[in-house]
């Protein structure tokens, strides 16, 4: 959390004058994300009364009594933890840290708030800290989450980059977590298509994690969006990554898992996507590859969409008539339209030389009258021609 300590009088004064957006900013620092009890309380009475209660300058919100049985008692139990964090919070330092990096706060109801996050219900973020030149709501309108293993293979990294490059060329935004491996390849593929991309972090937006992606985050911030539920200065924790994954899933129309073991955070993101009614997709890999075992599990047990390229993704998440993939190239040859008997007789005509109708009939397994009738029709269609010694394929058709 943001360091520093405010005196008791200053804390009370600041809390009493909180507007709702800044109250939500304070909640990102004092409460764990995805607390559904707190989320329901916020929906009923707003953030400022809740923060005043935590600060000790306001009464317990009356709406807490309207929650499910036992919920008010659970809230009071959590109050001690929230109050302890609040007393350690230096709000001036938090505000200054955000201003220093050009971070902005996006709250539910703001023009930049992606309304699809409301599908999370009471577990939606209290607010989002964001930075970057892109508009979050606009970037997420047509977006796909692409996630996978940190220890990605060369195959997985190549597929992720090509996939997101293809999506970017079609006007779609890639959402991922900024980690090594598949996440990083996905972001780079989108940037190569000159398309903004969105990074959802499990730490403050001013904390480059992983450190090796500092330059990548700078490139993303130019036109894309970097966002987090945690305030500036927050360092990542193992549990935070799992909490963060629900936001990646909710922001996007669907989630593609490129590579993952059977126990993987990427499968956690896919699980959130399935619970939210989003499309779940997976890229197949070598059957001997451990890094694709999770993808094969999704294909086998979750009936995930099989993805081999951007067109397959848009088949799952795109609009009918606008984003659907073209049908596979399956040119119909004239002989494909023949009835089975005519096709069998045509196959019995030798590729070189000629054969009499009796020989063709025996080879095709049909009687002579049927063979003669079909040979006449095949000749009319240009499939065979009469020769001095029988029937043969036209010279232009012979191999």
Image: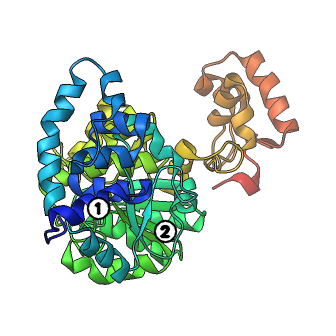
* Most foreground residue, 50 or 16: 16
> What element does badge 1 sit on?
helix
- Which residue is label 2 attached to? 165
x 35%, y 35%: residue? 41
How dense is the environment of label 1, judged by Cα within 10 Å: few (below 14), some, or many (20 and up)?
few
x 48%, y 56%: residue? 309
Q: Nearer the viewer, mark 2 or mark 1?
A: 1
Residue 135 drawn at (x, y percent):
54, 67
State the quadrant of the C terminus: bottom right
Mark 2 or mark 1, earlier in chain:
1
x 38%, y 58%: residue? 18
The residue furthest right is 380
Residue 315 drawn at (x, y percent):
56, 45
* Most foreground residue, 224 or 37: 37
Q: For residue 370, which quarter of the picture?
A: top right
Could one spot residue 274 in this view of the protein? no
Q: Are marks 2 and 1 in contact (CB under 8 Å)?
A: no
How dense is the environment of label 2, judged by Cα within 10 Å: few (below 14), some, or many (20 and up)?
many
Going by the image, does 276 lie left or right of 259?
right
- Which residue is label 1 attached to? 13
């Amino acid at each position: 959390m943001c360091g520093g300590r405010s005196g008791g009088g200053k804390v009370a004064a600041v809390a009493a004058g909180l507007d709702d957006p800044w109250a939500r900013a304070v909640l990102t620092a004092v409460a764990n994300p995805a607390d559904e009890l707190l989320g329901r309380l916020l929906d009923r009475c707003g953030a400022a009364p809740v923060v005043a209660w935590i600060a000790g300058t306001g009464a317990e919100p009356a709406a807490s009594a309207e929650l499910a049985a036992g919920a008010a008692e659970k809230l009071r139990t959590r109050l001690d933890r929230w109050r302890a964090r609040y007393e350690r919070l230096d709000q001036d330092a938090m505000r200054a840290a955000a201003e220093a990096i050009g971070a902005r706060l996006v709250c539910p109801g703001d023009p930049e708030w992606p309304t699809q996050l409301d599908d999370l219900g009471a577990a939606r973020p209290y607010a989002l800290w964001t930075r970057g030149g892109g508009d979050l709501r606009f970037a997420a309108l047509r977006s796909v989450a692409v996630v996978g293993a940190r220890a990605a293979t060369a195959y997985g990294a190549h597929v992720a980059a090509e996939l997101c490059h293809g999506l970017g060329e079609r006007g779609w935004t890639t959402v991922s977590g900024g980690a090594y491996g598949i996440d990083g390849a996905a972001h780079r593929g989108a940037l190569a298509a000159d398309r903004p991309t969105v990074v959802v972090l499990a730490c403050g937006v001013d904390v480059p994690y992983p450190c090796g992606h500092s330059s990548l985050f700078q490139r993303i911030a130019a036109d894309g969006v970097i966002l987090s539920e945690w305030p500036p200065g927050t360092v990542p924790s193992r549990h935070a990554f799992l909490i963060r994954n629900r936001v990646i899933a909710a922001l996007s129309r669907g989630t593609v898992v490129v590579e993952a073991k059977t126990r993987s955070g990427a499968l956690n993101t896919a699980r959130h996507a399935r619970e939210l009614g989003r499309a779940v997709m997976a890229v197949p890999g070598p059957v001997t590859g451990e890094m694709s075992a999770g993808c094969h599990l999704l294909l086998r047990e979750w009936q995930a969409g099989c993805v081999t390229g951007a067109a397959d993704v848009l088949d799952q998440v795109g609009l009918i008539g606008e984003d659907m993939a073209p049908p596979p190239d399956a040119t119909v040859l004239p002989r494909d339209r023949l009835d089975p008997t005519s096709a069998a007789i045509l196959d019995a005509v030798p590729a070189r030389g000629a054969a009499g109708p009796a020989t063709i009939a025996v080879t095709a397994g049909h009687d002579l009258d049927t063979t003669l009738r079909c040979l006449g029709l095949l000749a009319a269609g240009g499939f065979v021609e009469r020769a001095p010694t029988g029937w043969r394929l036209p010279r232009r058709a012979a191999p």
